[in-house]
Amino acid sequence: MQQAAPFTSLPERARGVIPGGVNSGQRNVPGLTDLVITRAQGASFWDSDGRQYTDYHAAFGPPLLGHNDPDVVRAVAEAGGSLDLCGVGVTEGEVELAETLVELVPSMERVLLTSTGSEATFHALRVARAATGRRLVVKFQGCYHGWHDSVSLNVISAPDRVGHKDPISTGILPEVLDATLVLPFNDRDAVRAAFAEHGADIAAVILEPVPHNVGCLLPDQEFLVTLREECTRHGSVLVFDEVITGVRHGLGGWQEVAGIVPDLTTMGKAIANGYPIGAIGGRADLMDMFSSRPGAPVFFAGTYNGHPAVVAAALATLRKLRAEPVHEHVFRLGERVRTELPPVLASLGVPAVVTGYGSVFVTYFMDRLPHTYDDLLDNDTRMFVGYRRRMIDQGVFELPLNLKRSHFSYAHTDADVDRLIEVTEAAVRAQLADEGPLTDMDGTSTMGGATRC
């Protein structure tokens, strides 16, 4: 066995035994490669040097209640005192969680639990193909649906890759990529054209109803209506990937906000304040095709599905979201930033727009609100990444990767908003004054461009 070299720092030790030193590609952030996090609580985390950061990244958003919410932590500890993994039968918590999701989410008539959102979207596409006997899947430029091959393409694409297949990984079979149609988001005409040409072979349409993996592109209501109409007309399965929008934008997800009911819905760790859980739910006839029902044809399994600890976390999270004014609080903070930050940026003479929904906000450096992914190509990446790096130096953490959104949690306060606006102004002012090149920009602006093989 190879022995670890006597490195002197934890990041060096990590890079000696973990490829890149981190356990997810999106954690290896240029400029932060030596970051070691030692504690997280409420709206903050601390690094190994003892520095505190007000956290607006929040693991891409799932801890809506804040880090280490005491009610969630207590529920997990209590579950661990009586149950662990048995891998047979069902627990009372699993039943209660499924009943709660069916009650809250308009599309859910049946529910199955997974360990991740990626697994949930994988199963959604598998069952859609099984139910329809069709080959093609439609996704949209700028939407991310997890790591599996059918949807691992065209997320944050460079300008020359928009309109082409743009896989985020090598190792994907060409015929898998060829079975996915990529359309522009918010383009009703493109949807109608795709169904006119391929409708008899489209098994499913999957989308983030709000593409949050590129910040925040708010959907046209007419676009969502068109999706529902075309899927219904052609017998295709409409899948809302609500891994981000579910719970954070409302207990019923974006489908409740928009009044559009998909056939299947996928959810993720946000339902458990960040604990590793996912869910797929929807029409009973589709869900009953999974092999969790004896004799059904679509295989479904997972040793950790419904683990008592994460189920307890989800139940505690949903109870608190229903009992306390969480959404009222985070929506108000989000609205403060979207209202108060634009005039501050305007006073600096920098083209910028602040958009988002509810507790989500993002500042794009362009002269108009984006409506499509193509609009986002005008975002000033140097400014976007540069000002966020400067904010980190002041203890305010927004992820310094292009187009990434920020979030409020129940643990954030009005004082945090005041400080956020103050630090943002100072960071943008400093970035405007710095005409030198921004170093370490590789990997900050794309999630694509992998050579096809």
Image (tube, rainbow, N blue to C red):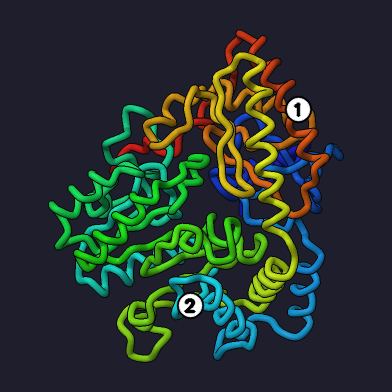
Lateral position of residue 414 relative to residue 142, left or right: right
Spot occupied by residue 275 in the image (x, y as percentages of width and height) = 65, 64
Residue holding disc 1: 423
Look at 58% across and 67% down and name the residue there. Answer: 277
Q: Give, as a three-letter code, the residue at label 2.
A: Val
Q: CA distance from mark 1 to mark 2?
A: 44 Å
Percent coordinates x, y for residue 346 in the rendering: 62, 19
Q: Position of residue 379 (x, y in %)?
A: 48, 26
Position of the C terminus, as image quadrant, is: top left
Residue closer to the observer: 276 or 384: 384
**Local secondary structure at mark 2:** strand
For the residue marked with disc 1, what is the amino acid?
A: Val
Q: Residues within 10 Å of mark 1 (few under 14, many from 20)?
A: many
Mark yes or no: residue 65 visible.
Answer: yes
Judge by depth and name the residue closer to the eye, 407 or 52.
407
**Mark found first going from the N terminus, 1 or 2:** 2
Residue name at image x 37 percent, y 38 percent: 450
Question: Residue under circle 2?
Answer: 111
Residue 51's disc is: none
Mark 2 Cα shell of 10 Å, populated few (<14), some (14-19), many (≥20): many
